[in-house]
Amino acid sequence: MIGEPIARVWHVTLGIGAVLLLLIAYTILSMRQHRENPDDKTIPSWSQLSEGVKKSVEVNQRSNERWVVADAQATSLRLFWGVFWGVSGSLLIGMLMGCFAFVEAFLYPPLAFLAKIPPIALLAVFFVLAGTGETMYVTMIAFGVLPTLAQTVYLAVKEVPAELRYKAYTLGASHLEIIWNVLLRHVLPKLIDAIRLQIGPAMVYLIAAEMVVGDVGFGYRIRLQFKLLNMSVVYPYIVVLGAFGFGIDYALRKLQAFVSPWYAKGY
Amino acid sequence: MGRIIIFAVCAAALAQTAFAAKPPVFSLAWSEYPSWSAFGVCHETGLINGAAGKLGSIEEKWGVDIELKEAEYDPCIAMYGAGQTDAVCITNMDVLNASLSRPGVAILATSTSYGADACIVSSAIADVKDLKGKKVRGLALSVSEYCFARNLQILGEDPAEYTFVNMDPGAAALAMQQKQADFDAIVVWNPFVLDTLNQRKDCHVLFDSSSIPNEIIDMVVMSESALQKPKGKEFASAVADAFYALNKRMADATTRDDTLIALGEKFSNLDLQSMRKVVQQTKFYATPEEATKLFDSAELKDTMTKVVDFCVKMEIVAKKPVVAFGAGATGNLVFDPAYIAAAAAKP
Protein backbone atom coordinates (compact mmCIF):
# COMPACT_ATOMS: atom_id res chain seq x y z
CA MET A 1 0.00 0.00 0.00
CA ILE A 2 1.23 3.52 -0.69
CA GLY A 3 2.64 5.19 2.41
CA GLU A 4 2.91 1.97 4.41
CA PRO A 5 5.52 2.30 7.17
CA ILE A 6 8.53 -0.01 7.41
CA ALA A 7 10.43 -1.37 10.38
CA ARG A 8 13.33 0.70 11.77
CA VAL A 9 15.85 -2.00 10.97
CA TRP A 10 14.94 -1.60 7.30
CA HIS A 11 15.48 2.14 7.49
CA VAL A 12 19.02 1.62 8.76
CA THR A 13 19.94 -1.19 6.37
CA LEU A 14 18.65 0.65 3.33
CA GLY A 15 20.48 3.82 4.33
CA ILE A 16 23.78 1.99 4.75
CA GLY A 17 23.13 0.09 1.54
CA ALA A 18 22.76 3.30 -0.45
CA VAL A 19 26.09 4.65 0.84
CA LEU A 20 27.81 1.32 0.15
CA LEU A 21 26.41 1.28 -3.36
CA LEU A 22 27.86 4.74 -4.00
CA LEU A 23 31.27 3.65 -2.71
CA ILE A 24 31.24 0.49 -4.82
CA ALA A 25 30.23 2.42 -7.92
CA TYR A 26 33.08 4.85 -7.33
CA THR A 27 35.57 2.02 -6.84
CA ILE A 28 34.52 0.39 -10.11
CA LEU A 29 34.72 3.71 -11.95
CA SER A 30 38.17 4.41 -10.55
CA MET A 31 39.43 0.91 -11.34
CA ARG A 32 38.18 1.19 -14.91
CA GLN A 33 39.93 4.54 -15.38
CA HIS A 34 43.16 3.13 -13.92
CA ARG A 35 43.05 0.19 -16.29
CA GLU A 36 43.04 2.70 -19.14
CA ASN A 37 45.80 4.79 -17.61
CA PRO A 38 47.57 3.54 -14.47
CA ASP A 39 48.79 7.05 -13.65
CA ASP A 40 45.35 8.62 -13.84
CA LYS A 41 44.64 11.37 -11.31
CA THR A 42 41.14 12.36 -12.39
CA ILE A 43 39.27 9.51 -10.70
CA PRO A 44 41.78 8.72 -7.96
CA SER A 45 42.04 5.30 -6.37
CA TRP A 46 41.48 4.95 -2.64
CA SER A 47 45.21 5.06 -1.92
CA GLN A 48 45.55 8.23 -4.01
CA LEU A 49 42.60 9.70 -2.15
CA SER A 50 44.21 9.02 1.20
CA GLU A 51 47.31 10.85 -0.07
CA GLY A 52 45.09 13.81 -0.95
CA VAL A 53 43.43 13.75 2.46
CA LYS A 54 46.86 13.66 4.08
CA LYS A 55 47.93 16.63 2.00
CA SER A 56 44.88 18.64 3.08
CA VAL A 57 45.16 17.97 6.81
CA GLU A 58 48.94 18.01 7.26
CA VAL A 59 50.79 21.22 7.97
CA ASN A 60 51.83 22.52 4.57
CA GLN A 61 55.55 23.16 4.16
CA ARG A 62 55.23 26.41 2.29
CA SER A 63 52.30 28.12 3.92
CA ASN A 64 52.81 26.61 7.38
CA GLU A 65 49.09 25.97 7.67
CA ARG A 66 46.74 23.04 7.56
CA TRP A 67 44.79 23.64 4.37
CA VAL A 68 41.48 22.29 5.50
CA VAL A 69 41.63 24.19 8.80
CA ALA A 70 42.53 27.51 7.21
CA ASP A 71 39.89 27.07 4.52
CA ALA A 72 37.15 25.96 6.89
CA GLN A 73 37.88 28.93 9.11
CA ALA A 74 37.78 31.45 6.29
CA THR A 75 34.70 30.03 4.60
CA SER A 76 32.66 29.55 7.76
CA LEU A 77 33.42 33.03 9.05
CA ARG A 78 32.36 34.56 5.75
CA LEU A 79 29.23 32.44 5.69
CA PHE A 80 28.39 33.22 9.30
CA TRP A 81 28.67 36.99 8.98
CA GLY A 82 26.94 37.01 5.63
CA VAL A 83 23.97 35.01 6.89
CA PHE A 84 23.97 36.94 10.16
CA TRP A 85 23.57 40.31 8.45
CA GLY A 86 21.16 38.86 5.90
CA VAL A 87 18.93 37.43 8.63
CA SER A 88 19.10 40.58 10.75
CA GLY A 89 18.21 42.76 7.80
CA SER A 90 15.43 40.51 6.61
CA LEU A 91 13.93 40.27 10.08
CA LEU A 92 13.80 44.04 10.34
CA ILE A 93 12.47 44.59 6.84
CA GLY A 94 10.05 41.68 6.97
CA MET A 95 8.64 42.77 10.31
CA LEU A 96 8.17 46.35 9.17
CA MET A 97 6.48 45.16 5.99
CA GLY A 98 4.20 42.82 7.89
CA CYS A 99 3.21 45.48 10.42
CA PHE A 100 2.88 48.60 8.33
CA ALA A 101 1.01 48.75 5.06
CA PHE A 102 3.03 51.79 3.93
CA VAL A 103 6.30 49.93 4.17
CA GLU A 104 4.69 46.93 2.57
CA ALA A 105 3.52 48.88 -0.45
CA PHE A 106 6.90 50.56 -0.75
CA LEU A 107 9.16 47.52 -0.43
CA TYR A 108 7.18 44.61 -1.77
CA PRO A 109 7.72 45.21 -5.52
CA PRO A 110 11.52 45.63 -5.46
CA LEU A 111 11.91 42.75 -3.03
CA ALA A 112 9.79 40.39 -5.10
CA PHE A 113 11.90 41.29 -8.12
CA LEU A 114 15.28 41.07 -6.38
CA ALA A 115 14.42 37.70 -4.88
CA LYS A 116 14.32 36.28 -8.38
CA ILE A 117 17.81 37.39 -9.47
CA PRO A 118 20.45 34.74 -8.88
CA PRO A 119 23.30 36.52 -7.06
CA ILE A 120 25.85 34.57 -9.11
CA ALA A 121 24.79 36.74 -12.02
CA LEU A 122 25.48 39.74 -9.81
CA LEU A 123 28.99 38.59 -8.93
CA ALA A 124 30.63 41.22 -11.12
CA VAL A 125 28.37 43.92 -9.66
CA PHE A 126 29.41 42.99 -6.14
CA PHE A 127 33.10 43.12 -7.11
CA VAL A 128 32.53 46.60 -8.44
CA LEU A 129 30.44 47.88 -5.54
CA ALA A 130 31.96 46.08 -2.58
CA GLY A 131 35.56 45.49 -3.61
CA THR A 132 37.23 42.13 -3.43
CA GLY A 133 38.03 41.88 0.28
CA GLU A 134 36.19 40.15 3.12
CA THR A 135 33.43 42.78 3.06
CA MET A 136 32.48 41.65 -0.42
CA TYR A 137 31.75 38.05 0.64
CA VAL A 138 29.65 39.23 3.56
CA THR A 139 27.75 41.81 1.51
CA MET A 140 27.13 39.36 -1.25
CA ILE A 141 25.74 36.60 0.97
CA ALA A 142 23.72 39.09 3.02
CA PHE A 143 22.11 40.61 -0.07
CA GLY A 144 21.80 37.20 -1.65
CA VAL A 145 19.67 35.71 1.10
CA LEU A 146 17.91 38.87 2.22
CA PRO A 147 15.06 39.20 -0.32
CA THR A 148 13.82 35.63 0.10
CA LEU A 149 14.15 35.70 3.88
CA ALA A 150 12.46 39.09 4.14
CA GLN A 151 9.56 37.75 2.13
CA THR A 152 9.32 34.74 4.42
CA VAL A 153 9.19 36.95 7.51
CA TYR A 154 6.66 39.25 5.93
CA LEU A 155 4.39 36.39 4.91
CA ALA A 156 4.72 34.78 8.34
CA VAL A 157 3.65 38.02 10.01
CA LYS A 158 0.65 38.23 7.70
CA GLU A 159 -0.25 34.67 8.63
CA VAL A 160 -0.64 35.42 12.34
CA PRO A 161 -4.39 35.17 13.00
CA ALA A 162 -5.94 38.59 13.60
CA GLU A 163 -7.70 37.21 16.70
CA LEU A 164 -4.37 36.83 18.43
CA ARG A 165 -3.54 40.46 17.85
CA TYR A 166 -6.97 41.66 19.02
CA LYS A 167 -6.73 39.52 22.08
CA ALA A 168 -3.32 40.89 22.98
CA TYR A 169 -4.52 44.45 22.47
CA THR A 170 -7.56 43.75 24.65
CA LEU A 171 -5.26 42.49 27.37
CA GLY A 172 -3.50 45.83 27.19
CA ALA A 173 -0.37 45.01 25.19
CA SER A 174 1.59 47.81 23.54
CA HIS A 175 2.65 47.68 19.86
CA LEU A 176 6.16 46.62 20.80
CA GLU A 177 4.88 43.95 23.13
CA ILE A 178 2.76 42.51 20.36
CA ILE A 179 5.72 42.43 18.02
CA TRP A 180 7.93 40.80 20.63
CA ASN A 181 5.48 38.43 22.32
CA VAL A 182 3.15 37.48 19.52
CA LEU A 183 4.53 38.14 16.06
CA LEU A 184 8.20 37.28 16.62
CA ARG A 185 7.35 33.99 18.34
CA HIS A 186 5.27 33.05 15.37
CA VAL A 187 7.86 34.13 12.81
CA LEU A 188 10.99 32.56 14.32
CA PRO A 189 10.46 28.87 13.47
CA LYS A 190 9.41 29.76 9.93
CA LEU A 191 12.44 31.99 9.57
CA ILE A 192 14.70 29.15 10.69
CA ASP A 193 13.07 26.86 8.13
CA ALA A 194 13.76 29.46 5.47
CA ILE A 195 17.37 29.91 6.60
CA ARG A 196 17.85 26.16 6.29
CA LEU A 197 16.75 26.39 2.69
CA GLN A 198 18.86 29.49 2.02
CA ILE A 199 22.13 28.02 3.34
CA GLY A 200 22.45 26.07 0.10
CA PRO A 201 22.26 29.11 -2.20
CA ALA A 202 24.43 31.12 0.19
CA MET A 203 27.13 28.44 -0.13
CA VAL A 204 26.81 28.57 -3.91
CA TYR A 205 27.45 32.34 -4.00
CA LEU A 206 30.28 32.06 -1.54
CA ILE A 207 32.10 29.23 -3.30
CA ALA A 208 31.70 30.94 -6.66
CA ALA A 209 33.13 34.18 -5.32
CA GLU A 210 36.00 32.38 -3.63
CA MET A 211 36.82 30.62 -6.86
CA VAL A 212 37.31 33.98 -8.54
CA VAL A 213 38.89 36.26 -5.97
CA GLY A 214 39.74 34.15 -2.93
CA ASP A 215 43.21 33.46 -1.59
CA VAL A 216 41.92 31.10 1.08
CA GLY A 217 38.66 29.17 1.50
CA PHE A 218 36.97 26.08 0.12
CA GLY A 219 36.22 27.61 -3.28
CA TYR A 220 39.79 28.84 -3.71
CA ARG A 221 41.31 25.49 -2.84
CA ILE A 222 38.97 23.51 -5.04
CA ARG A 223 39.63 25.70 -8.07
CA LEU A 224 43.39 25.66 -7.58
CA GLN A 225 43.63 21.94 -7.00
CA PHE A 226 41.29 21.29 -9.91
CA LYS A 227 43.59 23.26 -12.16
CA LEU A 228 46.53 21.23 -10.88
CA LEU A 229 44.44 18.11 -11.56
CA ASN A 230 44.75 17.07 -7.91
CA MET A 231 41.33 15.47 -7.83
CA SER A 232 42.53 13.47 -4.82
CA VAL A 233 42.24 16.74 -2.91
CA VAL A 234 39.10 18.00 -4.66
CA TYR A 235 36.88 15.01 -3.83
CA PRO A 236 37.64 14.97 -0.09
CA TYR A 237 36.99 18.70 -0.05
CA ILE A 238 33.59 18.14 -1.62
CA VAL A 239 32.81 15.57 1.06
CA VAL A 240 33.88 18.07 3.72
CA LEU A 241 31.61 20.69 2.13
CA GLY A 242 28.72 18.25 2.27
CA ALA A 243 29.40 17.53 5.93
CA PHE A 244 29.70 21.26 6.55
CA GLY A 245 26.27 21.94 5.10
CA PHE A 246 24.80 18.96 6.91
CA GLY A 247 26.26 20.20 10.22
CA ILE A 248 24.77 23.66 9.78
CA ASP A 249 21.39 22.17 8.93
CA TYR A 250 21.48 19.96 11.99
CA ALA A 251 22.41 22.88 14.24
CA LEU A 252 19.58 25.00 12.84
CA ARG A 253 17.10 22.18 13.44
CA LYS A 254 18.24 21.92 17.05
CA LEU A 255 17.98 25.69 17.40
CA GLN A 256 14.44 25.59 16.07
CA ALA A 257 13.44 22.89 18.53
CA PHE A 258 14.97 24.98 21.28
CA VAL A 259 13.42 28.38 20.52
CA SER A 260 9.99 27.07 19.52
CA PRO A 261 9.40 23.62 20.90
CA TRP A 262 5.70 23.97 20.07
CA TYR A 263 6.52 24.08 16.37
CA ALA A 264 6.72 20.32 15.91
CA LYS A 265 7.78 19.11 12.51
CA GLY A 266 9.09 15.95 10.95
CA TYR A 267 12.54 16.81 9.72
CA MET B 1 21.59 -15.56 -59.15
CA GLY B 2 24.41 -13.86 -61.00
CA ARG B 3 22.70 -10.54 -60.61
CA ILE B 4 22.37 -11.05 -56.91
CA ILE B 5 26.07 -11.79 -56.59
CA ILE B 6 26.98 -8.70 -58.60
CA PHE B 7 24.64 -6.66 -56.44
CA ALA B 8 26.15 -8.07 -53.25
CA VAL B 9 29.67 -7.37 -54.47
CA CYS B 10 28.72 -3.83 -55.41
CA ALA B 11 27.07 -3.26 -52.04
CA ALA B 12 30.10 -4.61 -50.24
CA ALA B 13 32.39 -2.41 -52.29
CA LEU B 14 30.22 0.61 -51.59
CA ALA B 15 30.19 -0.12 -47.89
CA GLN B 16 33.94 -0.53 -48.04
CA THR B 17 34.52 2.87 -49.63
CA ALA B 18 32.03 4.49 -47.30
CA PHE B 19 33.89 2.98 -44.39
CA ALA B 20 37.31 3.91 -45.72
CA ALA B 21 36.17 7.46 -46.44
CA LYS B 22 35.36 7.98 -42.80
CA PRO B 23 38.60 9.25 -41.30
CA PRO B 24 39.34 8.74 -37.58
CA VAL B 25 38.28 11.53 -35.21
CA PHE B 26 40.82 13.24 -32.98
CA SER B 27 39.86 16.03 -30.61
CA LEU B 28 41.63 19.27 -29.77
CA ALA B 29 40.57 21.30 -26.73
CA TRP B 30 41.22 25.02 -26.96
CA SER B 31 40.45 28.17 -25.01
CA GLU B 32 40.30 31.79 -26.11
CA TYR B 33 43.84 33.10 -26.45
CA PRO B 34 45.31 34.94 -29.45
CA SER B 35 47.32 32.09 -30.88
CA TRP B 36 44.83 29.40 -29.86
CA SER B 37 41.75 31.18 -31.15
CA ALA B 38 43.50 30.51 -34.43
CA PHE B 39 41.83 27.10 -34.44
CA GLY B 40 38.43 28.66 -33.90
CA VAL B 41 39.08 30.99 -36.83
CA CYS B 42 40.28 28.02 -38.91
CA HIS B 43 36.84 26.54 -38.33
CA GLU B 44 35.12 29.78 -39.35
CA THR B 45 37.13 30.02 -42.53
CA GLY B 46 36.53 26.38 -43.47
CA LEU B 47 40.16 25.26 -43.24
CA ILE B 48 38.99 22.73 -40.71
CA ASN B 49 35.51 21.79 -39.61
CA GLY B 50 35.38 21.55 -35.83
CA ALA B 51 32.40 19.21 -35.76
CA ALA B 52 33.06 15.49 -35.70
CA GLY B 53 31.97 13.85 -38.94
CA LYS B 54 32.55 16.92 -41.11
CA LEU B 55 35.74 17.78 -42.92
CA GLY B 56 37.42 21.04 -43.84
CA SER B 57 40.01 21.37 -46.59
CA ILE B 58 43.00 20.64 -44.37
CA GLU B 59 41.29 17.66 -42.75
CA GLU B 60 40.68 16.22 -46.21
CA LYS B 61 44.28 16.77 -47.15
CA TRP B 62 45.54 14.74 -44.18
CA GLY B 63 42.70 12.26 -44.01
CA VAL B 64 41.80 12.95 -40.38
CA ASP B 65 38.76 14.42 -38.69
CA ILE B 66 39.59 17.18 -36.21
CA GLU B 67 37.02 17.79 -33.51
CA LEU B 68 37.40 21.15 -31.80
CA LYS B 69 36.30 21.45 -28.18
CA GLU B 70 36.18 24.97 -26.87
CA ALA B 71 36.21 25.57 -23.12
CA GLU B 72 37.74 27.79 -20.47
CA TYR B 73 41.43 27.22 -19.92
CA ASP B 74 41.21 25.31 -16.62
CA PRO B 75 38.58 22.83 -17.84
CA CYS B 76 40.74 22.28 -20.94
CA ILE B 77 43.58 21.10 -18.71
CA ALA B 78 41.21 18.85 -16.76
CA MET B 79 39.76 17.45 -19.99
CA TYR B 80 43.23 16.56 -21.18
CA GLY B 81 44.20 15.03 -17.83
CA ALA B 82 41.04 12.92 -17.78
CA GLY B 83 41.68 11.62 -21.30
CA GLN B 84 38.59 13.29 -22.74
CA THR B 85 40.55 15.01 -25.46
CA ASP B 86 43.49 13.85 -27.55
CA ALA B 87 45.24 17.19 -27.74
CA VAL B 88 45.05 20.45 -25.84
CA CYS B 89 46.20 24.04 -26.13
CA ILE B 90 48.30 24.62 -23.03
CA THR B 91 51.42 26.43 -21.82
CA ASN B 92 54.78 24.78 -21.27
CA MET B 93 54.31 25.29 -17.54
CA ASP B 94 50.78 23.99 -17.01
CA VAL B 95 51.39 20.89 -19.08
CA LEU B 96 54.04 19.58 -16.68
CA ASN B 97 51.61 18.45 -14.01
CA ALA B 98 49.23 16.89 -16.51
CA SER B 99 52.14 15.11 -18.18
CA LEU B 100 52.89 13.19 -14.99
CA SER B 101 49.64 11.27 -15.32
CA ARG B 102 49.33 11.45 -19.11
CA PRO B 103 52.60 11.61 -21.03
CA GLY B 104 52.38 14.03 -23.92
CA VAL B 105 54.18 15.34 -26.94
CA ALA B 106 54.46 19.04 -27.75
CA ILE B 107 53.52 18.92 -31.41
CA LEU B 108 53.36 22.64 -32.08
CA ALA B 109 54.47 25.88 -30.45
CA THR B 110 51.97 28.62 -31.27
CA SER B 111 53.28 31.71 -29.51
CA THR B 112 55.38 33.07 -26.69
CA SER B 113 54.57 35.75 -24.20
CA TYR B 114 56.60 38.85 -25.05
CA GLY B 115 54.97 41.45 -22.84
CA ALA B 116 51.58 39.74 -22.66
CA ASP B 117 52.15 38.98 -18.97
CA ALA B 118 52.95 42.12 -17.04
CA CYS B 119 53.26 43.51 -13.56
CA ILE B 120 51.21 46.71 -13.53
CA VAL B 121 51.74 49.13 -10.67
CA SER B 122 50.26 52.42 -9.52
CA SER B 123 52.28 55.64 -9.52
CA ALA B 124 53.07 55.02 -5.85
CA ILE B 125 55.57 52.42 -6.94
CA ALA B 126 58.61 53.63 -8.80
CA ASP B 127 61.06 50.86 -8.08
CA VAL B 128 60.72 47.14 -7.59
CA LYS B 129 61.87 47.56 -3.97
CA ASP B 130 58.74 49.61 -3.28
CA LEU B 131 56.76 46.41 -3.75
CA LYS B 132 58.11 44.95 -0.53
CA GLY B 133 55.36 44.69 2.05
CA LYS B 134 52.71 45.35 -0.60
CA LYS B 135 50.35 42.73 -1.91
CA VAL B 136 50.92 41.76 -5.51
CA ARG B 137 47.80 40.13 -6.92
CA GLY B 138 47.52 37.60 -9.69
CA LEU B 139 46.59 34.00 -10.34
CA ALA B 140 48.68 31.85 -8.00
CA LEU B 141 50.75 28.96 -9.33
CA SER B 142 50.30 30.17 -12.89
CA VAL B 143 52.50 31.80 -15.51
CA SER B 144 51.73 35.10 -13.76
CA GLU B 145 53.51 33.99 -10.62
CA TYR B 146 56.30 32.51 -12.70
CA CYS B 147 56.75 35.76 -14.61
CA PHE B 148 56.78 37.66 -11.32
CA ALA B 149 59.34 35.38 -9.66
CA ARG B 150 61.62 35.27 -12.72
CA ASN B 151 61.67 39.03 -13.12
CA LEU B 152 62.51 39.51 -9.45
CA GLN B 153 65.31 37.04 -9.93
CA ILE B 154 66.63 38.94 -12.95
CA LEU B 155 66.50 42.18 -10.96
CA GLY B 156 68.58 40.51 -8.25
CA GLU B 157 65.74 40.32 -5.74
CA ASP B 158 64.65 37.40 -3.57
CA PRO B 159 61.04 36.37 -4.40
CA ALA B 160 60.63 35.13 -0.82
CA GLU B 161 60.65 38.74 0.36
CA TYR B 162 57.60 39.62 -1.73
CA THR B 163 53.94 38.74 -1.21
CA PHE B 164 52.02 37.26 -4.09
CA VAL B 165 48.31 36.92 -3.36
CA ASN B 166 45.92 34.82 -5.41
CA MET B 167 43.20 36.49 -7.42
CA ASP B 168 41.60 35.82 -10.74
CA PRO B 169 43.27 38.08 -13.35
CA GLY B 170 39.93 39.48 -14.53
CA ALA B 171 38.91 40.41 -10.99
CA ALA B 172 42.35 41.82 -10.19
CA ALA B 173 42.28 44.01 -13.31
CA LEU B 174 38.80 45.21 -12.45
CA ALA B 175 39.81 46.10 -8.89
CA MET B 176 42.88 47.92 -10.20
CA GLN B 177 40.81 49.89 -12.69
CA GLN B 178 38.47 50.86 -9.86
CA LYS B 179 41.40 52.04 -7.72
CA GLN B 180 40.28 49.89 -4.83
CA ALA B 181 42.11 50.41 -1.57
CA ASP B 182 45.30 48.42 -1.07
CA PHE B 183 45.61 47.71 -4.79
CA ASP B 184 49.01 48.86 -5.91
CA ALA B 185 50.26 46.00 -8.00
CA ILE B 186 48.82 43.23 -10.13
CA VAL B 187 50.34 40.61 -12.40
CA VAL B 188 47.90 39.74 -15.18
CA TRP B 189 47.91 38.70 -18.80
CA ASN B 190 46.29 40.10 -21.89
CA PRO B 191 43.66 41.36 -22.56
CA PHE B 192 43.78 42.57 -18.95
CA VAL B 193 47.21 44.19 -19.36
CA LEU B 194 46.18 46.47 -22.22
CA ASP B 195 42.72 46.97 -20.77
CA THR B 196 44.07 48.16 -17.42
CA LEU B 197 46.67 50.41 -19.02
CA ASN B 198 43.97 51.90 -21.24
CA GLN B 199 41.68 52.61 -18.30
CA ARG B 200 44.27 53.92 -15.88
CA LYS B 201 46.75 56.27 -17.42
CA ASP B 202 48.52 56.77 -14.09
CA CYS B 203 49.57 53.12 -13.97
CA HIS B 204 52.68 51.77 -15.56
CA VAL B 205 54.33 48.47 -16.31
CA LEU B 206 57.03 47.70 -13.75
CA PHE B 207 58.24 44.69 -15.71
CA ASP B 208 56.78 42.17 -18.10
CA SER B 209 57.52 38.95 -19.90
CA SER B 210 59.54 40.65 -22.66
CA SER B 211 62.51 40.18 -20.33
CA ILE B 212 62.03 36.43 -20.56
CA PRO B 213 61.27 35.75 -24.25
CA ASN B 214 60.61 32.12 -25.23
CA GLU B 215 60.14 31.13 -21.59
CA ILE B 216 56.35 31.25 -21.42
CA ILE B 217 55.36 29.20 -24.43
CA ASP B 218 51.83 28.59 -25.67
CA MET B 219 51.62 25.31 -27.46
CA VAL B 220 49.60 22.30 -28.51
CA VAL B 221 50.25 19.06 -26.65
CA MET B 222 48.96 15.69 -27.75
CA SER B 223 48.88 12.61 -25.58
CA GLU B 224 51.51 10.04 -26.40
CA SER B 225 48.96 7.23 -26.63
CA ALA B 226 46.69 9.15 -29.03
CA LEU B 227 49.70 9.93 -31.21
CA GLN B 228 50.41 6.21 -31.54
CA LYS B 229 46.90 5.46 -32.80
CA PRO B 230 46.45 5.00 -36.56
CA LYS B 231 46.49 8.41 -38.25
CA GLY B 232 47.56 10.06 -34.97
CA LYS B 233 50.65 11.52 -36.58
CA GLU B 234 48.60 12.84 -39.49
CA PHE B 235 46.35 14.59 -37.00
CA ALA B 236 49.36 16.25 -35.35
CA SER B 237 50.61 17.40 -38.75
CA ALA B 238 47.17 18.65 -39.75
CA VAL B 239 46.93 20.78 -36.60
CA ALA B 240 50.28 22.36 -37.42
CA ASP B 241 49.27 22.79 -41.06
CA ALA B 242 46.04 24.56 -40.09
CA PHE B 243 47.92 26.89 -37.78
CA TYR B 244 50.39 27.89 -40.48
CA ALA B 245 47.63 28.31 -43.05
CA LEU B 246 46.00 30.83 -40.75
CA ASN B 247 49.30 32.59 -40.15
CA LYS B 248 49.62 33.03 -43.91
CA ARG B 249 46.28 34.80 -43.85
CA MET B 250 47.62 37.08 -41.15
CA ALA B 251 50.77 37.82 -43.12
CA ASP B 252 48.75 38.65 -46.25
CA ALA B 253 47.86 42.34 -46.29
CA THR B 254 44.43 41.72 -47.82
CA THR B 255 43.24 39.30 -45.13
CA ARG B 256 45.33 40.51 -42.22
CA ASP B 257 42.95 42.90 -40.44
CA ASP B 258 40.00 40.63 -41.00
CA THR B 259 41.82 37.71 -39.42
CA LEU B 260 42.98 39.85 -36.49
CA ILE B 261 39.45 40.97 -35.78
CA ALA B 262 38.25 37.37 -35.97
CA LEU B 263 41.01 36.32 -33.55
CA GLY B 264 40.10 39.03 -31.10
CA GLU B 265 36.34 38.66 -31.28
CA LYS B 266 35.76 36.62 -28.16
CA PHE B 267 39.17 37.28 -26.64
CA SER B 268 38.53 40.85 -25.60
CA ASN B 269 36.75 44.06 -26.41
CA LEU B 270 39.99 45.62 -27.57
CA ASP B 271 39.89 47.43 -30.90
CA LEU B 272 41.92 46.59 -33.99
CA GLN B 273 44.71 48.92 -32.92
CA SER B 274 45.04 47.16 -29.59
CA MET B 275 44.75 43.74 -31.21
CA ARG B 276 47.80 44.61 -33.33
CA LYS B 277 49.63 45.23 -30.08
CA VAL B 278 48.28 42.00 -28.60
CA VAL B 279 49.82 39.93 -31.36
CA GLN B 280 53.11 41.72 -30.83
CA GLN B 281 53.06 40.94 -27.13
CA THR B 282 51.93 37.41 -27.81
CA LYS B 283 54.54 36.69 -30.41
CA PHE B 284 53.36 34.02 -32.83
CA TYR B 285 55.72 31.36 -34.07
CA ALA B 286 54.24 32.16 -37.45
CA THR B 287 56.33 29.88 -39.66
CA PRO B 288 57.54 26.29 -39.33
CA GLU B 289 61.11 27.62 -39.33
CA GLU B 290 60.57 29.72 -36.21
CA ALA B 291 58.98 26.87 -34.28
CA THR B 292 61.61 24.36 -35.39
CA LYS B 293 64.34 26.76 -34.37
CA LEU B 294 62.78 26.99 -30.92
CA PHE B 295 62.39 23.22 -30.56
CA ASP B 296 66.00 22.60 -31.59
CA SER B 297 67.51 25.36 -29.47
CA ALA B 298 69.66 24.82 -26.40
CA GLU B 299 67.79 27.76 -24.90
CA LEU B 300 64.58 25.71 -24.69
CA LYS B 301 66.29 23.00 -22.64
CA ASP B 302 67.54 25.67 -20.30
CA THR B 303 64.07 27.21 -20.05
CA MET B 304 62.38 23.92 -19.31
CA THR B 305 64.88 23.22 -16.52
CA LYS B 306 63.99 26.59 -15.01
CA VAL B 307 60.26 26.00 -15.36
CA VAL B 308 60.45 22.49 -13.92
CA ASP B 309 62.50 23.73 -10.97
CA PHE B 310 59.98 26.48 -10.35
CA CYS B 311 57.10 23.98 -10.43
CA VAL B 312 58.88 21.64 -8.03
CA LYS B 313 59.67 24.48 -5.66
CA MET B 314 56.08 25.77 -5.69
CA GLU B 315 54.71 22.24 -5.31
CA ILE B 316 52.81 22.53 -8.57
CA VAL B 317 54.10 19.07 -9.47
CA ALA B 318 54.35 16.16 -7.06
CA LYS B 319 57.52 14.88 -8.69
CA LYS B 320 59.90 16.03 -11.37
CA PRO B 321 58.58 15.24 -14.86
CA VAL B 322 61.07 14.02 -17.45
CA VAL B 323 61.28 16.53 -20.29
CA ALA B 324 62.88 15.25 -23.47
CA PHE B 325 63.69 16.77 -26.84
CA GLY B 326 63.70 15.58 -30.42
CA ALA B 327 62.00 12.82 -32.40
CA GLY B 328 62.07 9.38 -30.78
CA ALA B 329 62.90 10.71 -27.32
CA THR B 330 60.87 9.42 -24.40
CA GLY B 331 59.68 11.21 -21.29
CA ASN B 332 56.64 12.76 -19.67
CA LEU B 333 56.84 15.65 -22.09
CA VAL B 334 58.63 15.43 -25.42
CA PHE B 335 59.24 18.40 -27.68
CA ASP B 336 59.06 16.83 -31.12
CA PRO B 337 59.39 19.11 -34.19
CA ALA B 338 58.60 16.23 -36.59
CA TYR B 339 54.96 17.26 -37.11
CA ILE B 340 55.82 20.88 -37.78
CA ALA B 341 58.31 19.63 -40.34
CA ALA B 342 55.71 17.28 -41.84
CA ALA B 343 53.24 20.14 -42.23
CA ALA B 344 55.91 22.28 -43.90
CA ALA B 345 56.95 19.45 -46.23
CA LYS B 346 53.45 18.93 -47.64
CA PRO B 347 52.25 22.31 -48.85
Image (cartoon, helix red, strand yellow):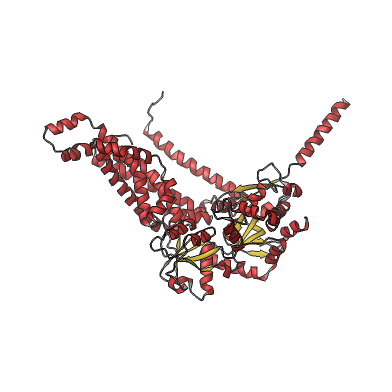
Residue lying at 24% horizontally and 39% vertically, measured from the top left: A260
Query: Which residue is farthest bottom?
Result: B156
Q: Classify the position of the N terminus of chain B by image quarter.
A: top right
Q: Is residue B339 left or right of residue A219?
A: right
Residue B306 is drawn in which quadrant? bottom right
Farthest right residue in view = B2
| Res A209 seen here | yes
* Nearest to the observer: residue B233 or residue A1: B233
**Image location of residue B310, percent across then percent down:** 54, 67
Residue A202, given in percent of the width and then of the height, sits at 38, 46
> Residue furthest toward the top?
A1
Q: Is residue B120 above or below residue A141?
A: below
**Residue A263 in sight:** no
Q: Position of residue B121 (x, y in %)?
A: 46, 66
Image spot of residue B15 (x, y percent): 78, 36
Q: Nearer the viewer, residue B320 or A107?
A: A107
Q: Is residue A163 above or below residue B79?
A: above
**B10 or A68, which lies in front?**
B10
Give the total of numbered labels: 0
Quadrant in which the C terminus of chain B appears:
bottom right
**Residue found at the very far left of the displayed protein:** A172
